[in-house]
């Protein structure tokens, strides 16, 4: 077979010759569908930009954004201070840049807690079924029915204000939709023939769950996670705004808005700029999530 | 198969379907009860680990040890936590939410005083979302892929993505501080305070009842900005769902039939397609309303709106445990209740689910 030796040819070959090639082809074809959607690409660029900015923060900024500089309080945006300075004379641009790390930290931490819990509860309920399913889904429904922000507020109040506790509170109020999705996927997978084959071969329940059911649930869970990301960011920012999230002097964007609130009328840039940062990032996640959903699940595309 | 297809015939249920219907109702009630127990249990546990001593909150820090111990026993704090929970639950069922430290009044009374303000805000916001969002969604669906559709999509995305407290501040800056089109934070100007007899607690209704149009106007001027801000989320969500339901309907064959028959386009859209969409929208509107009741916390903070969200937030910062618990439970119950209600309503209206 003298197949075309380019990478593109390899990725689009009619008959994949190896497991690796088949896998790469699937990703590549999804990628082609994804980049045809300009809106989704904008979303992806925003998120990549966010990660890039967070990674390069020490080289982009000129200060750590924490040290007060009272001689330069509340300066308007200028070539030296692009977004002006805040009530303690700190450069708002630098604080926004450092704040991107906190946003990513929140997002990553919530995902790391929420996805395994959701997958575990959902796949176990869906695959095993029966009484286990009923009990687990009741529990999920209870959490699903909760008012999220208020419960998160009460939780943070109980645990004490702070970034980690805010993340924990958000995670506790966010996992339930993932369990639902994983269960729905597990239900459809449960009766397929390859599961039966695995059962006949004597693969244990845990083996089936981790090696066969969970991987197939992942794509819908990831799509949902991307779509929920904006909500997570907004809730975290809201908790920060209420003084229940990250504590000063941490440059968390919601807390920055809260601190800048008193300067709204005369130094509008102090509270507005962090808000724009939140808006852009959550917009990015929403656009990306929409695009991913169109690729992975064209049926529900709106 | 085709029993009573006429709309509004839901009262004539065929005898055979009754047991299954009954089972469904029992099922709904059970899950409602379970959710309620789950909600109260979790909130209760949260309240117990809160860093506030409920005894100190009552007796004050200068009380003697005997008084302290006496109140400690009175509150049942020596009992295991599940006993304490059942005690709390039985008081709750009687409408007793304990006493607030901050206001020194029963929490239930406090909530009755603060809740109407939130209700007013959330209701107007939802109405704005309905009356602006639905036409927007229909417009977008009818002009799918064209500029109208794109504009609606962008507005929707911004409504989803913008932090509501920030949006509120920007709106205050522009419409209150710069343009002076609306009144500022709070529910009323200070000199109007306490003039209108509180009957329902909803200022617009109270002012209208006492025919004080000056106050009505003032209250409306204070309300319109926070309600619009709170309503952006409702608007975005309702517009998006209307669009996707509408697209679904417009691609159905009965629409093609209607068009082929020469029925005018507006008639096809509003009388044929939209009528079916409306049924689906009931659940969406219910969901929105419930989430606005809850989501008003941040809006209330920005606009100094004396509602339940502010009450809970202030209580949180003052370690006022009973008030936080009570507020959370009341909002939670409303949240769950509205969702269940819209679900039931949907079952009643949609013949396929019935």
Image (spheres, rainbow, N blue to C red):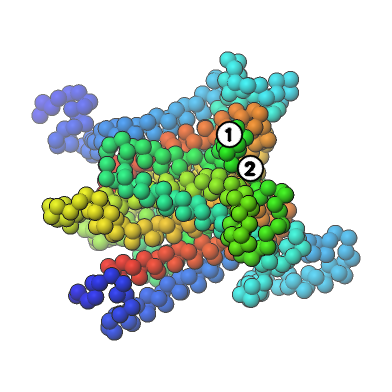
What residue would you read off at disc 2? B184
In-front residue for pair B182/A188: B182
Q: Residues within 10 Å of mark 2 (few under 14, many from 20)?
A: many
What residue would you read off at disc 1? B179
Say if residue A201 shows up in the picture: no
In whole angstroms, how far apart are the C-alphas of marks 2 and 1?
Answer: 12 Å
**Which image quarter: residue B107?**
bottom right
Which residue sits furthest left?
A1
Same chain check for tags 2 and 1: yes
Residue A73 sits above or below residue B39 on the image: above
Measured from the top left, where is residue B354 in percent x and y?
A: 31, 71
In-front residue for pair B128/B232: B128
Q: Secondary structure at mark 2?
A: loop
Residue B325 sits above or below residue A45 on the image: below
Chain letter of the residue beneath label 1 in the structure image = B
Residue under the image location 73 percent in, 62 percent down: B100
Chain letter of the residue beneath label 2 in the structure image = B
Residue under the image location 72 percent in, 67 percent down: B106
Measured from the top left, where is residue A104 in percent x and y?
A: 51, 36
Quadrant, the N terminus of chain B = bottom left
Residue under the image location 41 percent in, 42 percent down: B156
Say if residue A294 shows up in the picture: yes
Measured from the top left, where is residue A141 in percent x and y?
A: 45, 63
| Residue B24: assigned label | none
**Which image quarter: residue A5?**
top left
**Which image quarter: residue B329?**
bottom right
Name which of mark 2 and mark 1 comes first in the sequence. Answer: 1
Instruction: Answer with left or right where residue B287 lies relative to residue B83.
Output: left
Q: Secondary structure at mark 1?
A: loop
């Amino acid at each position: 077979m003298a197949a075309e030796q380019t990478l593109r040819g390899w990725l689009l070959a009619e008959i994949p010759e190896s497991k690796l090639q088949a896998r790469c082809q699937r990703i590549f074809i999804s990628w082609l569908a994804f980049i045809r959607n300009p809106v989704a690409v904008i979303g992806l660029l925003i998120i990549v930009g966010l990660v890039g900015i967070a990674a390069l923060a020490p080289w982009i900024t000129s200060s750590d954004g924490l040290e007060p500089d009272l001689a330069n309080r509340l300066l308007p945006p200028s070539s030296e201070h692009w977004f002006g300075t805040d009530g303690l004379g700190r450069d708002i641009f630098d604080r926004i840049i450092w704040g991107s790390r906190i946003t990513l930290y929140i997002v990553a931490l919530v995902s790391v807690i929420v996805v395994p819990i959701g997958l575990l509860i959902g796949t176990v309920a869906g695959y095993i079924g029966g009484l286990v399913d009923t009990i687990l889904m009741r529990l999920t429904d209870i959490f699903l029915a909760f008012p999220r922000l208020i419960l998160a507020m009460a939780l943070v109040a109980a645990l004490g204000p702070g970034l980690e506790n805010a993340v924990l509170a958000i995670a506790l109020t966010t996992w339930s939709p993932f369990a639902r999705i994983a269960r729905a996927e597990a239900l459809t997978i449960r009766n397929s023939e390859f599961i039966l084959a695995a059962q006949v071969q004597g693969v244990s329940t845990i083996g089936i769950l981790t090696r066969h059911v969970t991987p197939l649930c992942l794509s819908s869970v990831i799509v949902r996670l991307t779509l929920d990301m904006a909500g997570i960011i907004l809730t975290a920012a809201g908790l920060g705004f209420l003084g229940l999230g990250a504590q000063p002097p941490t440059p968390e964007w919601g807390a920055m808005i809260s601190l800048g609130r008193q300067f709204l009328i005369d130094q509008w840039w102090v509270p507005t700029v962090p808000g724009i940062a939140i808006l852009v990032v959550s917009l990015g996640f929403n656009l990306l999530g929409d695009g991913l959903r169109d690729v992975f699940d064209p049926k529900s595309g709106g | 198969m085709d029993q009573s297809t006429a709309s509004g015939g839901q009262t004539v249920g065929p005898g055979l379907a009754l047991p299954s219907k009954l089972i469904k109702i029992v099922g709904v009630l059970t899950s409602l009860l379970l959710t309620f127990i789950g909600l109260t249990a979790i909130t209760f546990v949260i309240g117990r680990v809160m860093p506030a001593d409920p005894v100190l909150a009552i007796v004050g820090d200068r009380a003697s040890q005997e008084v302290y111990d006496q109140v400690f026993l009175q509150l049942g704090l020596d009992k295991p936590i599940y006993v304490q929970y059942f005690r709390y639950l039985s008081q709750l069922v009687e409408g007793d939410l304990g006493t607030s430290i901050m206001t020194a009044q029963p929490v239930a009374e406090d909530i009755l005083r603060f809740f109407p303000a939130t209700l007013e805000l959330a209701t107007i916001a939802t109405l704005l979302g309905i009356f602006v969002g639905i036409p927007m969604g229909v417009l977008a669906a009818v002009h799918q892929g064209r500029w109208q559709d794109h504009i609606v999509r962008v507005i929707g995305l911004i409504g989803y993505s913008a932090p509501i407290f920030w949006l509120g501040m920007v709106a205050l800056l522009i419409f209150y501080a710069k343009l002076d089109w609306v009144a500022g934070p709070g529910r009323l100007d200070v000199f109007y305070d306490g003039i209108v007899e509180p009957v329902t607690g909803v200022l617009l209704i109270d002012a209208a009842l006492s025919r004080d149009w000056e106050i009505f106007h003032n209250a409306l001027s204070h309300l319109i900005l926070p309600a619009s801000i709170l309503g952006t989320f409702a608007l975005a969500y309702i517009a998006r769902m209307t669009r996707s339901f509408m697209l679904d309907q417009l691609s159905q064959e009965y629409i093609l039939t209607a068009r082929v028959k020469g029925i005018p386009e507006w008639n096809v859209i509003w009388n044929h397609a939209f009528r079916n969409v409306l049924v689906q929208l009931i659940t969406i509107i219910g969901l929105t309303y419930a989430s606005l009741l809850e989501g008003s916390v941040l809006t209330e903070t920005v606009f100094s709106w004396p509602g339940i969200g502010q009450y809970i937030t202030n209580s949180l910062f003052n370690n006022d445990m009973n008030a936080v618990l009570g507020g959370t439970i009341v909002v939670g119950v409303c949240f769950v209740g509205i969702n269940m209600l819209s679900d039931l309503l949907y079952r009643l209206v949609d013949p396929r689910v019935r």
